[in-house]
Structure formats: C-alpha cells, structure tokens
Image (cartoon, rainbow, N blue to C red):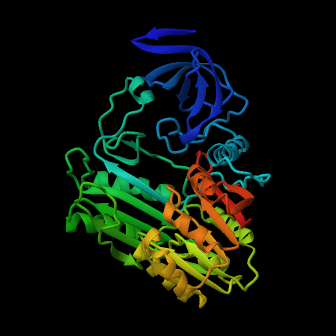
Amino acid sequence: MARKKTDKIVFENVEVLDAGAKGVSVAKAPDGKIIFIPNVVPGDVVDVQTFKKRKAYFEGKAVAFHKLSTQRVEPVCQHFGACGGCKWQNMGYEFQLGYKHQEVENNLKRIGKIELPQFEPILGSKEQFFYRNKMEFSFSNARWLTDDEIKSGEELGKENALGFHIPKMWDKILDIKKCYLQQDPSNALRNEIRDFANENGLEFFNPRENTGLLRTLMIRTASTGEIMVLIQFFKEDKKKRELLLEFLKNRFPEITSLQYVINSKLNDTIYDQNVICYHGRDYILEEMEGLKFSINAKSFYQTNSDQAYELYSITRDFAGLTGNELVYDLYTGTGTIAQFVSKNAKRVIGVEAVPEAIADAKVNAERNNITNCEFFVGDMKNVFNDEFIEQHGQPDVIITDPPRDGMHKDVVAQILKIAPKRVVYVSCNSATQARDLALMDEMYKVVRVRPVDMFPQTHHVENVVLLEKR
C-alpha cells in the first residue's frame, strides 16, 4: 500500500529482499520498481518514505519497522546510521559474507557471461573490528547534528568536530567519539587532539569559506606496533603548529613517525604536497612473512594487514610457481605482491605508474635482500608494450591487481598478445574484473575463483581469479 506524506510517497509493509551494491538494501515497490534503502537488513518489513524518484527506482528511508530480520545484530557503534562508514554493522557477519560472495558470483556471471568453475568459499576476516591500519579524519568548525540530537531538544551549539564526512555532504563532519575500525591508540589520539585543540584555541577548518588552521588527521598503524600520525594544516602558524605537535610528541611517545603538511589548496589530498617529518622517521615498517615494507605518508598499502597476507597467499597459490618462472606483476604499487612471490619465482618484474611507489618498492627489495625483483615506472597502457617485453622477457605468469576501474583495454590486448600460461587477476571491483575476463575469454579459461573479505561491516570485497591458457 502507498500513501502520500508531504508530497513524498510512503510505501507500507515493504519486505527488504536483498543487500545491494554500495551497502544499501533492496526492496520492491507495488509497481515493481526497485527501492534502495540504507540501514535495513534483508528480511526486515518496513514502511519506506521515498526522497528520490527516478525512472527505474526510488531511494528512501525506513520510517517504521513491522518485523525485524533474523539476519540482524545490534550495531556496536554509537555512530552507526549517521556515519555511513560501516553500513552493514547491523547484519550478522556470516550473512555479510554470503552477500559479498553472491555479488562476486552475480557480476562474473551477468557481466562476464563466461564459463565459470565452482567458486571457492569466500575467506572471511578473523578480526571483524579494529582491522584497519589507516584512518583519515577531517576537522570542521561546524559539527553535524544527528536526528537524535536535534530531537532531544537540548541546547546544541555548533561546536568543532573531528571525524568523518556525512555521506554525500562534502562540508559536513560527524564528530566521532569511538570508532571500531582501527586499533588503539587511534581513538585516544583523535579525541585528545580534538580536546587539546579546543582548549588551546586552535581553529578548526571551515570548508565553505576556506579558513581555519586544522584540516585533516591521518593515523597509520602497523602489525609491528609502529604508528604514524600526520596533521594537515591549512596555513602555517608556527607557534600553534608546534604547540600541537609538541603535545603529541610528549603525550604519545609511542608515535614512530610524527609528520605534518601545510596545504592551502582547495582540496585536501596530500599527494602533490610536501610532507615534513617533525619527529621520528618519515616512515613506519610493516612486516609480512619475514619481509619488511616501509610505508610513508603517501604509500599505498592494503588497509587490512592480516587479510592482505591471506590475499597474497591465495595469489601466490593460484600462480602455481615452481621457481623457474618469469613473473610480471602489473600495477605493483610498492611491490608487496612482487616481493611476496619472489622466493617462488626465477625473476619478477613490477610495473607501476606512481614514481614514489616504485622508489618504495626498490628500497623495500633492498631491505629484504631480494635480488630477483626489478621495478619500472610508467603508465601501464604505455609502458607495457612490445619493446618492454623484448627487453625484459616473455612472462610465464602475469599477476595483475588494477585499481577499481580495472585494466585498460590496451593492457588486456597486450596480455592476449604475449599469452602467458597463467594470469592471476586480483580485483577490488568484480564488475570491472568481469568485463576484463570477458575480453580474455577466447584465449583463457577461468579455473579458480576465490573472494576475500578485507573490509568487514562494509559491502566491499576483493576477488582472486586464476586464468589458464586454453
């Protein structure tokens, strides 16, 4: 049944049918149109008030619950629902894994339209909370007020906030008291920085007017116990900057790397900025199977260290190396996969577009006494050409771990041209992976598939595919 409420449709007694893309759930309106609803679980029966209507679907929110799903659990985080970070925290973990597995299977079948083997079971994460090794928080001088706070009727000043962006709102920051994604001392660091800044009159950033001092906070932790803290300031104010950095140095002596950036750009990305080390060294060390990797402020490293080890182990297993193979590791990043598989290969060639990442890869290989890895900088579609193959050799195995957009069509074409025996394709987006697999289907058969959950409480899932030459 549907009724109007302030010109917005309310659908009553709607059953939530599925968990969809981007962490929202899916139901059907009486006319058959899809309704996307956040913060509900398949099996819930709800009244939905729509706030957006499109030709093929509605977007809405649950305004009343008639029946609660058996897949539900109580969210542990006080910020659940407003934050938008852990969209599935109200769903039992075994069900989260089921929907992730289902998404990978659906994408490979519907988009790829290729012959597939029996999928291997999704590998769940041993830790379902406090698993991230990198968190980024934003400062704002106008705190986002939640519905509950507004309804409370209490006098609420628009005080400073240090936390996360409200979904789809670039200038609104939710003040975070306790986050369940990163281990201690992450929460203590964030909360004490906020308190110290408030007590000492350090201005929080105003993103609309581009004024203020404190802009962002990044915390990186490693399984070795090392900690990096980076404060981004909007402008230089030596006295106030040093006041905060000295406080952090003395209050948290366990910080391995204390760094800062002065960034007065309109955006807060640091990749084109000068990162200055205030105390300690300018990197932290991560360790995996005896290998040590230095991670600086701009480095890419898988954000779940424990599951990264599992992901790389599956990748190495799929590659089936005997010690005689020449391996190409495309989109190598800082060379972690390349070095992880190197002891099982004759030689590994890593290619990556980011010069700083390749510089890290070379330093890490030297630190780990690895002599059979070489790393090269270049845009994959340009550098991975006939001349490159002629110079470095015909690969027996290619490992590819591209960004969310998948591989450029020229890269796929070159893989087909040089036709290695095996290709191991690691992906964080099974939809673009499925598209690429379809392009390779005439020459390669998919023989193994295994999804890996790197991000519990969210909809994100990695997937590893082994292709063998037909």
Q: Looking at the figure, which quarter contains the C terminus?
A: bottom right
**Picture quadrant where residue 465 is located:** bottom right
Is residue 167 placed above or below 357 in the rendered structure? above
Position of 398 relative to 38 (above/below)? below
| Residue drawn at 59 percent across, 67 percent down | 400
Can you give x and y, in whole percent of width and height, for residue 374 in the image?
Answer: 54, 85
Q: Quadrant of residue 377?
A: bottom left
Residue 151 point in image, percent of width and height: 41, 23
Report the residue at 49% width, 85% height from top: 363
In-front residue for pair 78/5: 5
Name the side, left or right, on which 6 lies relative to 215: right
Residue 298 visible somewhere in the drawing: yes
29 versus 162 height, above or below: above
| 362 or 178: nearer the viewer | 362
Whether 310 is drawn above or below 146: the answer is below
- How far from the left and from the top, in percent, is residue 148? 45, 28
What residue is rendered at 72% in x and 60% in y? 445
Front position in the image: 286 or 258:
286
Determine whether, in the image, residue 174 is placed left or right of residue 46.
Answer: left
218 or 160, which lies in front?
218
Asked if residue 408 lies left or right of residue 100, the reply is left
Q: Position of residue 6 (x, y in %)?
A: 39, 12
